[in-house]
Structures are given as structure tokens and as C-alpha cells.
Amino acid sequence: MAPDVSDTPPPPRSRYAVTKRIEFCYGHRLIDHDGPCRHLHGHNGVVEVEVAAASLDERDMVCDFAEIARVVKGWLDRELDHRMILRRDDPLVAPLSAAGEPVYLVDENPTAECLARLVYEQMHRGGLQVSRVTLWETPSSSATYTRPGG
């Protein structure tokens, strides 16, 4: 008797992926946090952006590393690098802004998880087929956001 093909799992989809790492510096604090991260502090962060495709393009690439760097580094340099990333309702927003300090505002606590999602969303809007963003807050601590359903 032949095996029932309905019980056979589908073969895994082939997928190619490339990853680009970009370094940047930022500061933040976490409102309502009970640890030391409730205070202003900074990080030398690293963002890893993975771009994936089911097949290679006419150059036999998923995406040129230079294109990833242009989009990711360009946005990071303009928006987050050497800025204080704060929740919009943080009471320090007004005095830091009044003092001319560069501030980037977000709607939630600027945790590594939320920053990974922020970078993912911005890169997706920038036209990259992003499948994963990992934000390394320290050399031993990271958070990852992946494509929904991916």
C-alpha cells in the first residue's frame, strides 16, 4: 500500500539571507523600571539587519551589502546615533530639548526589544526585504524582532 501523501510534511522552503552589522551610539532610560536602567545611560549598540529572499537576483545576490548599509546606516545616523531615545511622556524630554540635546521620541519604553522593532519597521519602509533585526545593547545582551509569520 502506498503511503498517504497527506501525512507527509511539505519540504522546507529554500531561503537565502545576508546580514549586515552597523554600530551606533545612543542613550536612553526606562520609565517605571525598578533597576538601574531607570537612569539616563548610554550604549554602544550594534544592529544586525538580515535581508532574506527565496532566490538570488540577476547578480546572484539577495541584496548588496552596500545597499543595506546605505539604508540602515543612513537612517541610524540621521535619527538615532548620539541621541537620547526617550518615551514621549518622559518628564526629561522638555528640559533636554530646551537645552538643545538631540532627542528621539518613541511611544513606549525604548527597550532593546522596541528598538529592534523600530529599526525593522524603518528598514521595511526603506524598501529592504528585512526578515530579522537584532539589536545588541551590550556585547552579551540582545533583542531580536522577526518578520511576522516568518
Image (spheres, helix red, strand yellow):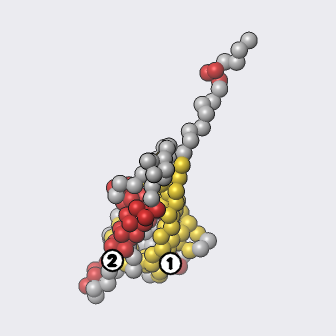
Residue sitting at the far right: 1
Q: Specify whether residue 34 is in view.
A: no
Residue 129 at x, y percent in the picture: 42, 51
| Residue at 33% over, 77% down | 103
- Relative vertical location of residue 55 with respect to residue 108 in this rendering, above or below: above
Q: Amino acid at mark 1?
A: Asn
Task: Between residue 104 and residue 108, name the one nearer to us.
Answer: 104
* Disc with the residue nearer the chain's start (1 vs 2): 1
Q: Are marks 1 and 2 in contact (CB under 8 Å)?
A: no
Task: Between residue 69 and residue 116, name the one nearer to us.
Answer: 69
Judging from the image, what secondary structure is the residue with disc 1 in? strand
Q: Residues within 10 Å of mark 2 (few under 14, many from 20)?
A: many
Q: Residues within 10 Å of mark 1 (few under 14, many from 20)?
A: some
Cα separation, mark 1 vs mark 2, equals: 17 Å
Q: Nearer the viewer, mark 1 or mark 2?
A: 1
Q: Which numbered circle lies on residue 44?
A: 1
Q: Split into 4 quadrants, where in the image is the N terminus?
A: top right
Judging from the image, what secondary structure is the residue with disc 2 in? strand
Q: Specify whether residue 137 is in view.
A: yes
Residue 18 at x, y percent in the picture: 52, 56
- Relative vertical location of residue 10 with respect to residue 77 in this rendering, above or below: above
Q: Amino acid at mark 2?
A: Val
| Residue at 36% over, 69% down | 74
| Residue at 70% over, 18% down | 3
| Residue at 61% over, 21% down | 6
Residue sitting at the far bottom: 99
Task: Between residue 143 and residue 86, name the one nearer to us.
Answer: 143
Residue sitting at the far front: 59
Residue 139 at x, y percent in the picture: 59, 73
Q: Which numbered circle lies on residue 67?
A: none
Task: Name the residue carrying label 2.
Answer: 103
Question: In the picture, residue 114 is in which quadrant?
Answer: bottom left
